[in-house]
Image (cartoon, helix red, strand yellow):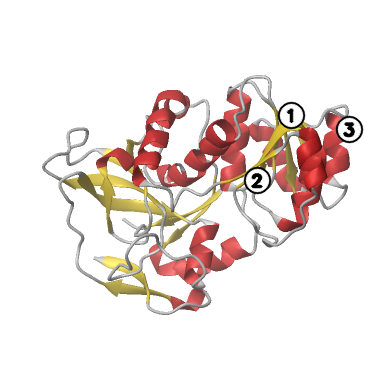
Amino acid sequence: MKAVVLEEFGGPEVLTIREIPDPIAGPDEVRIRVSATALNRADLLERQGRYAMPGNKPRYQIPGLEVSGVVDQVGERVVAYRPGDRVMALLSGGGYAEYAVSPERLTMPVPVGIDIINAAAIPEAFLTAFDALFTQGGAGPGSRVLVHAGASGVGSAAIQLAHQFHMSVVTTVGSQIKLEAARAFGADHVVNYRHEPFADAVLDWSQGRGVDVILDLVGQSYFADNLRVLSHDGTLVVIGTLSGTATTLDLGIVLGNRLKIQGTTLRSRAVEKKMALIQRFLKEAWPLLDRGLIAPVIDSTYDLADIAEAHRYLVSNQNIGKVLVRVG
């Protein structure tokens, strides 16, 4: 099969397409003939040698944390899927390839009405957003939620989920076109951080009460203001650190307001915990996708041969929603 194999680390030019052996499904796995994969910022870090795959070093290091496609081989203990089924899967790696292997319980059916290519934009973004909101953040109906990077894949998913579960959502973006997009996703208030300090805007919007949960993909530069806008007993969920990782923590604010700071990643999480998350997602959120009440937001689609250009585009931070790579 064709696959993007990392043989060295560096810029987009190191993304090399090679012919390697097809993977074989294990007893509890399905093999997927990949239709598409989606880019994540974790892929950029892995390409640079800054985000190693969990577990033992694989023979071929293939990036890609999510895929969509058609099952073409099942292990002997698999009961939920058969060859020909349309599926999407959360991976620890291996998505930039014509075939990918996934444990049965990390695989999900493609919702009715969603194109199989576009389905590649669902697993990482929607599972991350769902987990951050409900499991890590403890949000629920009536919660006030701040979602940073509201035009990103995770941000657009989080806004839609929060809206459907009757939360009040404020989000930050960096341009007028992204501001309009975030409103369309269901945000109640959108702040262009290039025009006004987001903390002041959030406190004005919330009438000084602050927010109950923050989903943050930015990190260092937002940390102090995130604590400032959290309400008593609020939770900051750190999903990414685009601006850096080192920061100063005022414990007085944390103690006085009884704040919680929760970090989260999916890739390094134990398989059993990923399975539990997916089962909850299938029960509570997947039906919203199936009924068309929420949907993946697609910015652009590249061919596998143009994978380096797709990485360059993601680095530019122009995208609204997900960047897909068509494989099959």
Q: Secondary structure at mark 3?
A: helix
Q: Quadrant of residue 1?
A: bottom left
Of marks 3 and 1, which one's residue comes earlier in the chain? Answer: 1
Q: Which residue is mark 2?
A: 151
User: Residue at (58%, 24%) from the top-left corner?
Assistant: 164
Q: Which residue is mark 3?
A: 204
Q: Position of residue 261 (x, y in %)?
A: 66, 43
Looking at the image, residue 238 lies above or below residue 61: above
Asked whether, in this view, residue 102 is left or right of residue 217, the answer is: left
Looking at the image, residue 57 lies above or below residue 66: below
Q: Quadrant of the C terminus?
A: bottom left
Of the pair 106 and 40, the residue shown nearer to us? 106
Asked whether, in this view, residue 324 is left or right of residue 227, the answer is: left
Q: Which residue is mark 1?
A: 188
Q: Which amino acid, mark 3?
A: Asp
Of marks 2 and 1, which one's residue comes earlier in the chain? Answer: 2
Q: Position of residue 190 (x, y in %)?
A: 77, 38
